[in-house]
Image: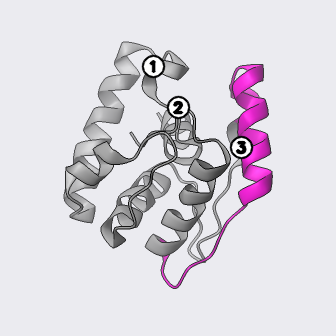
Amino acid sequence: MKIVLMVLGVVGLSLAALEIPEHLKAAVKIMRKACLVESGVDEKYVNQSRDGNLPDVPKLGCYILCFFEHAGMIEEDGTIHFNDVLHLLSPSLAETAKYVSEECKTIHGDTRCDTAWLTTKCFFEKAPEGSELP
């Protein structure tokens, strides 16, 4: 499940694009519900987050942070680890993910929520086609 959360949360690719097995889709849906509650973000902003559009809503960063935390991908200082799962992706997805992670790295904000949002925003800008929050 950590792999799925990282790929979806960091790279921002849709479930359909990754052809994730049904049993993992259910886990992502559970995590989505938990992170909506934990962050307090309105679900409409998550649903609007696709194809390069990432609404500038403070709680949306906390929603993204929730995924990073549950995937074990973010340090206390806000550094986000991207390269841990590149070898698990298909070659075309891995190439896109590698390019985007090298371009964006971790973009630190004032809070960990800001860092999650700014970094994900960069991913959405560098690879907008098919980008979507889980």
Q: Is residue 104 magenta?
A: yes
Q: CA distance from mark 1 to mark 2?
A: 9 Å
| Crowding at mark 2 (Cα within 10 Å: few <14, some 14-19, many 20+) | some
Label 1 vs label 3: CA separation? 22 Å
Q: Looking at this view, is 36 or 131 the one in front?
A: 131
Residue 103 magenta-highlighted: yes
Image x and y of residue 75, in percent: 59, 68
Identify residue for label 3.
84
Q: What residue is pinned by disc 2?
A: 130
- Which residue: 21% across, 50% down? 43
Q: Are marks 1 and 2 in contact (CB under 8 Å)?
A: no
Seen at 56% across and 47% down, the residue is: 10
Contact between marks 1 and 3 (CB within 8 A): the answer is: no
> Mark 1 or 3 closer to N-term?
1
Indicate the secondary structure of the residue bearing disc 2: loop
Q: Earlier in the sequence, mark 3 or mark 2?
A: 3
**Mark 1 or 3, closer to the camera:** 1
Q: What's the CA distance linking mark 3 and mark 2?
A: 22 Å
User: Looking at the picture, which amino acid does disc 1 mark?
Assistant: Ala
- Say what amino acid the circle numbered 2 marks: Gly
Question: Which residue, given by chain and number where applicable, does mark 1 sit on?
Answer: 16
What's drawn in magenta, residue-wise?
A: 86-112
Q: Report x, y in % for residue 70.
A: 43, 52
For marks 1 and 2, the one nearer the N-term is 1
Type of the residue with mark 3: Asp
Secondary structure mostly seen in magenta is helix
Is the C terminus in the top left, top right, bottom left or bottom right quadrant? top left
Q: Badge 1: few (under 14), some or many (20 or more) residues near its Cα, within 10 Å?
A: few
